[in-house]
Image: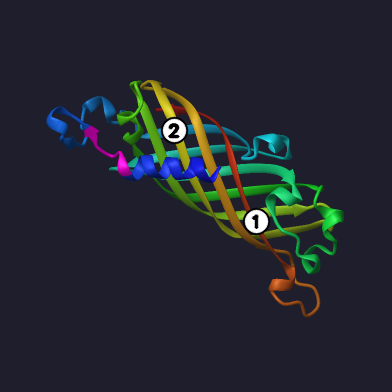
């Protein structure tokens, strides 16, 4: 998976220009590469990045984006369900449980985020298809994590990083693949004289999946 993310980064950083005659590299500015609608509604289903453990973690996301000049204002609501071990490392003081008691526990996470995104056409220079798009976005998030073993709810801020590669089939519809990385530090309510670290969990996980987007 690290190699896959590296390849995506190389595509973005090294292939922003299309090759033309005489070996010159120029930015592709064809009008067909420009979005024709200002509103994008996306539905995403994601799974654990380890395909052998895909059933251990899954999520569903709804995203709305509004085009502002060359950027998109990006908003997301993500519902994630998965094993504790796939989402976080145990903090016994926060959960009141040992690793073997909690690692196979199914828990739920709700993430709400707002940020900024950039739609580009870099991969189009490599692939023999028309209408290939990428979306890169970063959101600040608020997270609510229900840990079922302790019965406690952990809340706190985080970051959501998104990369999508999809094909636009017409002016109104596109479909493709996406990669979402969710990172958050969440805390439960304070009990007695606990320190902040005694009641905190760090969440971090990557999901890959499918995306359908509609433009209006």
Report the coloring of the rendering: rainbow
Give yes or no for residue 88 being in the magenta stretch: no
Q: Residue at x 81, y 78 (%)?
A: 192
Instruction: Characterize the magenta stretch by its predominant secondary structure.
Output: loop
Q: Nearer the viewer, residue 215 or 94?
A: 94
- Judged from the image, the secondary structure of the residue bearing numbered disc 2 is strand
Mark identifier at residue 191: none
Q: Is residue 63 above or below residue 191?
A: above
Q: Nearer the viewer, residue 66 or 141?
A: 141
**Mark 1 and mark 2: Cα distance apart in space:** 25 Å
Q: In the image, residue 110 lies at what x, y percent?
A: 65, 48
Which quarter of the figure has residue 33?
Answer: top left
Q: Is residue 81 visible?
A: yes
- Judged from the image, the secondary structure of the residue bearing numbered disc 1 is strand
Q: In the image, residue 43 lies at what x, y percent?
A: 54, 32
Which quarter of the figure has residue 8?
Answer: top left
Q: Is residue 86 above or below residue 155?
A: above
Mark identifier at residue 165: 2
What is the crowding at mark 2: few (fewer than 14 residues within 10 Å), some, or many (at least 20)? many
Q: Residue at x 55, y 48 (%)?
A: 181
Q: Which residue is mark 1?
A: 203
Q: In the image, residue 184 lies at what x, y percent?
A: 60, 58
Q: Residue at x 26, y 25 (%)?
A: 32
What is the crowding at mark 1: few (fewer than 14 residues within 10 Å), some, or many (at least 20)? many
The quarter of the rendered structure image containing the N terminus is top right
> What are the residue bounds of the magenta stretch?
14-18
Q: Is residue 209 left or right of residue 67?
A: right
Give yes or no for residue 16 being in the magenta stretch: yes
The quarter of the rendered structure image containing the C terminus is top left
Which quarter of the figure has residue 69?
Answer: top left
Q: In the image, residue 165 lies at what x, y percent?
A: 44, 33
Which residue, as the protein is rendered here, is positioned at the far bottom?
193
């Amino acid at each position: 998976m690290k190699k896959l993310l590296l390849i995506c980064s190389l595509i973005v950083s090294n292939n922003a220009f299309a090759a033309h005659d005489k070996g010159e590299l120029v930015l592709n500015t064809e009008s067909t590469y420009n979005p024709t609608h200002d509103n994008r509604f996306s539905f995403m289903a994601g799974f654990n990045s380890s395909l052998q453990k895909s059933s251990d973690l899954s999520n569903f996301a709804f995203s709305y984006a509004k085009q502002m000049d060359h950027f998109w204002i990006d908003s997301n609501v993500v519902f994630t369900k998965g094993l504790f071990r796939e989402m976080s490392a145990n903090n016994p003081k926060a959960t009141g449980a040992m690793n073997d008691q909690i690692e196979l526990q199914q828990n739920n996470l709700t993430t709400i985020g707002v940020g900024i995104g950039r739609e580009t056409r870099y991969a189009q220079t490599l692939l023999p298809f028309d209408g290939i798009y990428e979306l890169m976005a970063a959101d600040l998030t608020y997270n609510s994590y229900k840990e079922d073993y302790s019965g406690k709810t952990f809340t706190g801020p985080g970051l959501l990083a998104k990369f999508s590669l999809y094909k636009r089939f017409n002016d109104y519809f596109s479909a493709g693949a996406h990669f979402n990385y969710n990172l958050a530090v969440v805390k439960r309510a304070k009990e007695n004289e606990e320190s902040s670290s005694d009641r905190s969990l760090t969440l971090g996980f990557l999901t890959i999946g499918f995306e359908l987007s509609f433009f209006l």
